[in-house]
Amino acid sequence: MCITESKNYIDFSFTQDGSVGLYNRKVEDVYHSVFGALSEAEEKFAAPLNLSGNYLHKKNIKVLDICYGIGYNTKAFLKKILQTKYKGKVYIDILEYDKKLVTISPFIKDNLFKKYPEVSYILLANLLNEIIEDKAALKDILLKSDNKKFIEPFYRSLIKNKYFLRYSYNPLGQNNSFLHNIYYQCISQRNKRPLKRLKIHNFIIKPYFDDARNTIKSLNNKYDIIFLDAFTPAKLPTLWSYEFFKELYRLSDVNATLVTYSNSAAVRHAMLEAGFFAGKLFDKQHRHCGTIASPNNNLILNKLDEYDTGLIKTKAGIYYKDANLNLTAKEIIDLYNKEKSESNLQTPSQYIKKYKTEKL
């Protein structure tokens, strides 16, 4: 992800489920659906995960969250696993170019805090060092008067008065005391919210702040779950190329699940060429809402049908290429457009017309 360093490149707004959504003026794209930032994460990223069937038997669950933003996919996953009796370790690696978004993510109104204060606490406990180091982000974004209404009220005074901007040096003991106070007020028996199911220290979250292409080349974990939530391919093709999916396949456990909101034939084709099996995701109204992929075809409940596989064989299925994972977005798009213009493949409209005619 590549965005400007300007302080004012992000616009906040409330989505229809009460959670905060973002718009990036530099990329000219939204981070979240207007219908609900949290609802979208729960429906498109958390709901498709068959935790009980595929992962809760494991001693460790490893998650890769690509384009973390302000963390809705990780938050939705944390909520989902907090609802289980899982006692193992949960490792979450988050990839995000913009450190400021990660820094503010525990404090944003996300429609979770009232019932699941553990979620923001887990993020705080793991991201505290980055938060301390990036006080400018807190001051420039969270303390900006226009943004006050987007911050969880419980954290407002903590941000402004009690901790982050008051001290230039924060010894370990003070950090631990700060976290203990939050735990006591939000989670402990004092507020009748004991953490019965899962211990906080069972979560290990590690952020990486760089172009995700650079980071994945350096990773060697085998992940159980991968969230891919980059800007749309037309805006950010760098994270949708065949070569990027090859790296994700390398990092996938044999029973890994990769989920994304994209229904693109080009994205699905790149997944298939990289070694994944791919299938469709549906929302509550049974509308297409994304794609699921895995090295294990048995984990794909809704396979790509005849129409989907046919569309992949048209110009719509031409995927982005980035041989050394270092091209600019413009270079990738130029290569893509050149290949499409020179291709003799059927156009999507020709295919759709023929397909409908044959099915009559």
Image (cartoon, grey):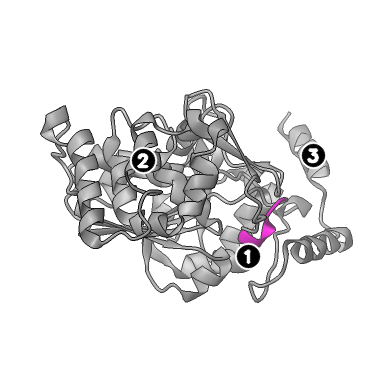
Q: Nearer the viewer, mark 3 or mark 2?
A: 2
**Quadrant occupied by the N terminus:** bottom right
Gap in angstroms between the C-alphas marked 3 and 2: 66 Å
Residue that carries the numbered disc 2 in the rendered image: 161
Q: Nearer the viewer, mark 1 or mark 3?
A: 1
On screen, residue 99 versus residue 270, left or right, reads left
Q: Amino acid at mark 1?
A: Tyr
Report x, y in % for residue 81.
Answer: 28, 43
Q: Is residue 238 magenta?
A: yes
Q: Is residue 89 magenta?
A: no
Q: Amino acid at mark 3?
A: Lys
Element type where label 3 sits in the image: helix
Q: Is residue 68 visible?
A: no
Residue that carries the numbered disc 3 in the rendered image: 354
Q: Nearer the viewer, mark 2 or mark 1?
A: 2
Element type where label 1 sits in the image: helix
Q: Are marks 1 and 3 in contact (CB under 8 Å)?
A: no
Report x, y in % for residue 194.
Answer: 14, 35
Q: Quadrant of residue 161?
A: top left
Dot 2 or dot 1, earlier in sequence:
2
Dot 3 or dot 2, earlier in sequence:
2
Which mark is on residue 242?
1
On screen, residue 127 versus residue 345, left or right, reads left
Dot 1 or dot 3, earlier in sequence:
1
Instruction: Name the residue nearer the viewer: 37 or 234.
Output: 37
What's the magenta region?
Answer: 235-239
Give the class, few, some or many, for how many residues have Cα within 10 Å of label 2's Cα (few <14, many ≥20).
few
